[in-house]
Each structure stands twice: as C-alpha cells, then as structure tokens.
Amino acid sequence: MATPVQPSFFIPHGGGPCFFMPDPAGNWTGMERFLKDLPATLPERPTAIIVVSGHWETRGFAFTGAARPPPIYDYGGFPPYTYDLRYDVPGAPALAARAADLLRAASLTATVDPARGLDHGVFIPLKVAFPDADIPLIEMSVDRDLDPALHVAAGRALAALRSDGVLILGSGMSFHNMRGYGDPRATAPSEEFDLWLTAAIAQPGPGRAEALQGWAIAPGGRFSHPREEHLLPLMVAAGASEAPGEHVYGELVLQTAISGFRFD
C-alpha cells in the first residue's frame, strides 16, 4: 500500500517555553490546542519530521545529523525548571543526508551538522504536538541571506519527501515584532498583514511564490517583521506544495494577529 502524501505546515511556536509555564491569562491556550490537535489532521503517522526553525541561521541551508539531538535552551529569563525540559527524540542522519542532497541537486547550498541540537523553535512546539518523542526528527536552518525566493526553492526541492511520509513543518511566527506584543497599537497593522498573508497563501504555487516575494511591502509587513527570520520557515513550507494553502489557525495573541497554515 502506498504511503499517503503528508502535508506541510507553517506553525507558530509561541514565546520561549510558554506552553510549559503557568498561563493564568490564557495567552497561549489556543495555540497549544492547535499544536496538540495537529497530529489528528494528518493522513497517517509521519515516517519522519523536518522542522525549519527561524532560530537557526546558516550560510546556505543546514540539517541536524545527530542520532540523538539534544535540546538547545536558546531562551533567557525564564524559570529554572524550563531549562530542564527534555525532548529525547531520535534523529534521522540518513534523512538529513538525503535532504541535503535534494537541495544540492536544485543548485542550493546545503550541509549536515552532526553535532547541533534542537532549538526551542523545534523542541517546544514538538513537545506539545508529538509528546511521545518517538518520530525521527531533523531540524533545518534558514539561510542568513533571508531571501524569500531561496526558501521557496528549498521547499520545492524537499517536496518529494512528502510522498515518503515525511512531515515538513515551518516553525516561526506570522507576527514577530517583539515591541508589538501586548501593545494595542500593534493590533491593526498585525491584522492587516495577517489578511494579506492569508490571501497570498490561498493562491496556488506559482502565484503564491510571486506574492510572498513582496511580503515586506504588504500592508503591515515590515512592521510585523522588522527582521524576517521568523517568516522564512513559512516560505519553505509553502514551497513544498503547489496546492493552494489553507488558513488552519488564527487568533489574537498578546493583541497581535497570529496564524498557521497548511499545504496539501
């Protein structure tokens, strides 16, 4: 029986270890629910997972190649117990090598890092969505040149892996202006960008890729992303599919519009 083709997603990963801390105001409740419910929307259990994180930038693209990648606690100022969180997931060195080969075949620069662990853009949301930590997982970096077209091309090169049951997740935030969180003045521009982004994502592959190139001049675009490293994982997820994208999560978080998207 053929392995069902997995979708690709752009998911929000929240703020630091937010899902594992008290949240009396319920700021992260809806996002946590979305992540918990995500596995039930898949055609079957993934054979492996690739997570593109906005918290890892390299020259060219890179993949983690460790057999047991440790967590990287790349957040600061949180309670001591959040630096003891574990996500002891198996790595997938062979998948990392294959993914790098696919990018090189598309004339993109790609390497495998045999030592690097998983940053919080990976292990925090995955600890919510796949708490058993039993699906082999690799992390993928974003290219430090921050070129949207390059990241769409990387997603396109990886698309074949979906037919092998590999789930591709872009992990970032659709709004990532640290000064805007909690500020009511950020609501309107974040919503403007969210509407634009949702419309762009709903287009099929070629039109979507062209639209995403212009994200910075979209209404609220540069305000929503003073620096775009948290938006680029979306470009990879979008590039991995030619089908119109679907808005599958959205709410106001800390008075800013945050969304998640699926690509079949």
Image (spheres, grey):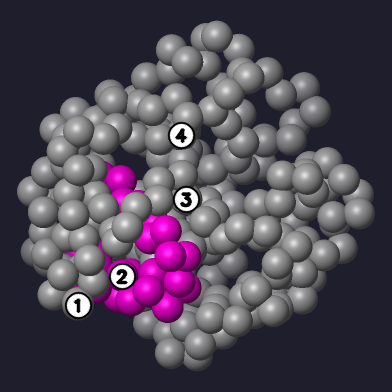
The earlier-in-sequence mark between 1 and 2 is 1
Residue shown at 15% from the left, 38% from the top: 114
Residue shown at 43% from the left, 17% from the top: 85
Callout 4 amino acid:
His
- 51 with respect to 2 (left or right): right
Counting other residues with Cα less than 10 Å from the Cα at mark 1, is it few (<14), some (14-19), or many (20 or more)? some
Question: Would you say residue 153 sits in the magenta stretch?
Answer: yes
The earlier-in-sequence mark between 4 and 3 is 3
Check contact, mark 4 vs mark 3: CB within 8 A: no
Question: Would you say residue 251 sits in the magenta stretch?
Answer: no
What distance separates the C-alpha of mark 3 from that of mark 2? Answer: 15 Å
| Quadrant location, the C terminus | bottom left
Residue shown at 11% from the left, 59% from the top: 98
- The residue lying toward the viewer, choosing from 181 and 129, is 181
Secondary structure of the residue carrying tag 1 is: loop
Secondary structure of the residue carrying tag 4 is: helix
Question: What residue would you read off at disc 2?
Answer: 154
Residue shown at 66% from the left, 52% from the top: 176
Secondary structure of the residue carrying tag 2 is: helix
Q: Which mark is residue 54?
A: 3
Question: What residue would you read off at disc 4?
Answer: 120
Q: Looking at the picture, how far across and down is residue 150, in whole percent?
A: 37, 74
